[in-house]
Image (cartoon, rainbow, N blue to C red):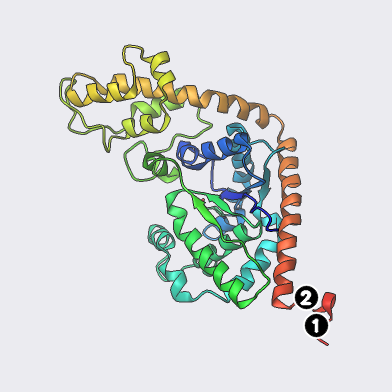
């Protein structure tokens, strides 16, 4: 009898700083929902420190420092270490063994075609000095995914090329090495386009620390209020009476990602829904400052419980470290099983099977 396919979820983040509200609507919120829904067999959440090193090799302290910050952000959002394995990539050595074997099935031309890697290379001004580790990180990411037999990978849209490349490697590997039985992963994208691409507070395409256009999950109320008040809106909405655009207006994009009916009832009961607020803004007669005050209230309402949980965990860093250590041990056990299966399929388990004789 065929066993029902398990649902195994794996995803992760590079620890290059604290996580922001773009990470939250793009993936973290969904992970917590899945966790609380309970409709899965295993869930692994990885802090991808080795991937972060591929373009930070000379600043390892930044990565080191960010590991605990990201772990705190995870716990603050409500990820529960008793239900999901929170672990650190560098502590699971089997990942790097799989990476080595997979590299042989990928061409340089294919690596150079990955659109996300291409745009990252452009952003980073690598020119001709692209680190080999950076160019090959999608292959390493395939190891991260397949080591856990992951069926579902919740990610943002920018990660689709990675999943596609992983699928190619899985197919190729399984056909070259029958018996490896690598599991074909599927991406799971955020519910809406708005959540997939939350712009920076300045309206630029992405939140980035260096641009100073982020709102972090750990920002206090005052910082959030300040950031929201500096936000970019519709540049043609000069007078309150002017009609305004709600599309490509980051204040409304954030509201679409965060605002629920309950927020309208609680903070702006003059309106029945966000749709009504939007209609008023488009018609004219609704000022930016009022909308921004409402957005700040909504964000603070969402962030408040997150900040409180973060504070509690931040006071016991030893416990957080222990959670990561325990998670990494569990993750290693699972990855070792996959690695053993792969070595067997490749017939390089020479001593356990006497296959050299
Ligand atoms: N590339 C992901 C990011 O930049 C992080 C990551 C590493 C990841 N390994 C992964 C995501 C495996 C999903 C699955 O955020």
- For label 1, being within 8 Å of ligand 1 is answered no
Report the side of 81 relative to 129 (left or right). right
For label 2, count other residues whose C-alpha is less than 10 Å away and answer few (under 14), some (14-19) or many (20+): some
Where residue 231 sits, quadrant-wise, is top left
- Where residue 310 sits: x, y (%)? 61, 30
Q: Residue furthest bottom?
A: 357
Which mark is on residue 355? 1
Q: Position of residue 196 (x, y in %)?
A: 41, 44
- Mark 1 and mark 2 residues within 8 Å of each other at the beta carbon: yes
* Residue at the (22%, 32%) spot, across then down: 245
Q: Residue at x 76, y 55 (%)?
A: 333
Which residue appears at 51% of the width and 59% of the height? 55
Relative to 136, say whether 314 is above or below. Answer: above
Answer with the quarter of the image where residue 51 lies.
Answer: bottom right
Q: Secondary structure under badge 2?
A: loop
Q: Which residue is mark 2?
A: 349
Q: Nearer the viewer, residue 228 or 278?
A: 278
Q: Is residue 14 visible?
A: no
* Front in this rendered view, residue 29 or 53: 29
The one of 71 and 143 positioned closer to us in this rendering? 143
**Left or right relative to 335: residue 309:** left
Q: Looking at the image, can residue 135 be seen? A: yes
- Helix, strand or loop at mark 1: loop
Q: Nearer the viewer, residue 337 or 234?
A: 337
Q: Residue 60, how many percent across, how many down?
A: 60, 54
The N terminus appears in which quarter of the rendering? bottom right
Residue depicted at 47% across the width and 68% down the height = 130
Instruction: Choose the circle earlier in sequence order: 1 or 2.
Output: 2
């Amino acid at each position: 009898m065929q066993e029902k396919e398990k649902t195994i979820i794996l995803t992760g983040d590079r620890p290059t700083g604290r996580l922001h509200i773009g990470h939250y609507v793009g993936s973290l919120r969904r992970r917590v929902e899945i966790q609380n829904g309970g409709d899965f067999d295993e869930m692994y959440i990885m802090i991808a420190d080795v991937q972060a090193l591929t373009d930070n090799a000379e600043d390892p302290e930044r990565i080191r420092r960010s590991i605990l910050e990201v772990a705190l952000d995870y716990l603050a959002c409500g990820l529960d270490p008793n239900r999901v394995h929170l672990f650190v990539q560098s502590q699971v050595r089997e990942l790097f063994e799989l990476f080595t074997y997979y590299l042989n099935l990928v061409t340089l031309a294919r690596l150079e075609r990955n659109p996300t890697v291409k745009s990252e290379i452009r952003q980073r001004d690598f020119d001709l000095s692209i680190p080999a580790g950076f160019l090959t990180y999608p292959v390493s990411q395939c190891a991260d995914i397949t080591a856990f037999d992951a069926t579902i990978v919740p990610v943002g849209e920018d990660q689709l090329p990675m999943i596609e490349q992983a699928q190619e490697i899985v197919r190729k590997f399984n056909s070259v090495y029958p018996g490896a039985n690598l599991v074909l992963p599927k991406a799971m994208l955020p519910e809406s386009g708005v959540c997939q691409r939350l712009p920076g507070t300045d309206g630029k395409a992405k939140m980035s620390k260096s641009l100073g256009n982020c709102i972090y999950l750990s920002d206090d109320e005052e910082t959030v209020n300040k950031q929201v008040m500096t936000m970019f809106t519709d540049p043609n909405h000069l007078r309150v009476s002017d009609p305004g655009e709600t599309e490509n207006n980051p204040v409304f994009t954030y509201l679409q990602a965060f605002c629920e009916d309950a927020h309208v009832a609680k903070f702006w009961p003059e309106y029945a829904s966000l749709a009504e607020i939007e209609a008023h803004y488009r018609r004219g007669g609704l000022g930016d400052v009022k909308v921004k005050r409402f957005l700040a209230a909504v964000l603070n309402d969402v962030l408040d419980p997150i900040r409180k949980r973060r504070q509690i965990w931040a006071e016991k860093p030893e416990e957080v470290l222990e959670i990561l250590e325990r998670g990494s041990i569990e993750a290693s056990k699972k990855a070792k099983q996959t690695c053993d299966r792969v070595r067997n399929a490749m017939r390089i388990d020479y001593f356990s099977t006497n296959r050299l004789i």
